[in-house]
Amino acid sequence: MDAGEVRTRMLAQFGLRIEPAMSEYVVRQIGNTASSSGASFPVMGGDARTGVPVRRFIPAAAFEVASPTSSQLVVVTTRART
């Protein structure tokens, strides 16, 4: 997982906007806490709605990459040109 994907997921999952330096920190923390179940780490950023600075503890499990299940698969169909 790269820093750009971390920023996108932080915004989508937690409503938290983070700077590039913080996203790099999160990538490092994910690598450090990967073996610890139930581990969390602090993240500082801005609330997406209000812009107020916040500090939240984010569970490392929120960034685990799960193998896709049948409910997660996306089917893309295209129409033939006529």
Image (spheres, helix red, strand yellow):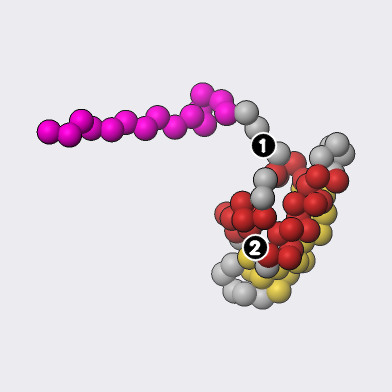
Corner quadrant of residue 60: top right
What residue occupies the far top of the structure in this picture? 70
Task: Tell me if residue 58 can be seen.
Answer: no
Amino acid at the residue labelled 2: Leu
76 magenta-colored = yes
Q: Residue at x 70, y 44 (%)?
A: 62
Q: Taking 1 as reference, is 40 left or right?
A: right
Task: Tell me if residue 28 can be seen.
Answer: yes
Q: Residue at x 80, y 52 (%)?
A: 28
Q: Which mark is residue 65?
A: 1
The CA span between labels 1 and 2 is: 20 Å
Quadrant where the N terminus sits is top right
Near-viewer residue (49 or 63): 63
**Residue 42 at x, y = what percent?**
81, 59
Q: Is residue 51 above or below residue 69?
A: below
Between label 1 and label 2, give the one nearer the viewer: 1
Near-viewer residue (25 or 36): 25
Tell me the residue that label 2 is attached to: 16
Amino acid at the residue labelled 1: Val
Q: Which residues are magenta?
A: 68-82
CB within 8 Å, label 1 to label 2: no
Query: Within 10 Å of the Cα at label 2, are there few (<14), some (14-19), or many (20+) other Cα atoms?
Result: many
**Residue 51 at x, y = what percent?**
62, 75
SS category of the residue bearing label 2 = strand
